[in-house]
């Protein structure tokens, strides 16, 4: 009886293994569609201003997400420039007199930082 049961069990195991390995049907590879926008990005750009041609929001203000609407960081009055567009340091207007360091909440220079400390030699001469 034990041999019959072992034989039937082996038969069921062999049959289940043979059925479990069915080959998958081959599918044709699908070409990926190329998108002009990145994932998560809106496909439409905002409306352009008719006068300047720059992107604007719905309320008409310039859209600061775009490079052409961002303002230059150094809005100081500059003197003459070199041919490559950098400020010419030979002129007084382009020289930085003293780099400004961090300030306190009331706007006065914070003396804990090196940039804001005055040199002792300068104080003695003056």
Image (cartoon, rainbow, N blue to C red):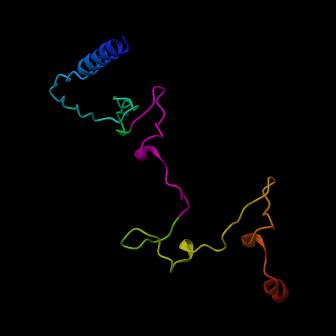
Count of numbered circles in the view? 0
Q: Nearer the viewer, residue 118 or 126?
A: 118
Q: Position of residue 126 (x, y in %)?
A: 82, 85
Q: Position of residue 43 (x, y in %)?
A: 34, 29
Side (left or right) of 76 relative to 105: left
Determine if the magenta segment contains residue 73: yes
Residue 124 in the image: above or below residue 92: below
Determine if the magenta segment contains residue 71: yes
- Quadrant in the picture for residue 39: top left
Q: In the current view of this chain or complex, which residue is farthest to the front?
A: 1
- Quadrant in the picture for residue 49: top left
Side (left or right) of 11 relative to 95: left
- Quadrant in the picture for residue 20: top left
Q: Please name the residue shown 40% across and 68% down the image.
A: 85
Q: Please name the residue shown 80% across and 87% down the image.
A: 121
Side (left or right) of 17 relative to 107: left
Quadrant where the N terminus lies? top left
Q: In the current view of this chain or complex, which residue is farthest to the bottom?
A: 125
Q: Position of residue 9 (x, y in %)?
A: 33, 15
Which residues are the magenta region? 55-77
Side (left or right) of 81 relative to 102: left
């Amino acid at each position: 009886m034990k041999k019959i049961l072992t034989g039937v069990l082996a038969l069921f195991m062999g049959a289940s293994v043979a059925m479990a390995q069915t080959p998958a049907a081959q599918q044709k590879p699908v070409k990926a569609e190329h998108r002009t926008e990145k994932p998560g990005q809106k496909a439409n750009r905002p409306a352009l201003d008719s006068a300047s041609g720059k992107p604007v929001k719905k309320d008409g203000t310039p859209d600061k997400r775009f490079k052409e609407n961002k303002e230059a960081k150094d809005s100081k009055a500059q003197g003459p420039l070199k041919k490559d567009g950098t400020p010419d340091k030979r002129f007084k207007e382009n020289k930085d007199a003293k780099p400004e360091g961090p300030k306190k909440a009331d706007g006065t220079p914070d003396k804990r930082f090196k940039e804001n400390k005055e040199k002792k030699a300068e104080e003695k001469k003056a």
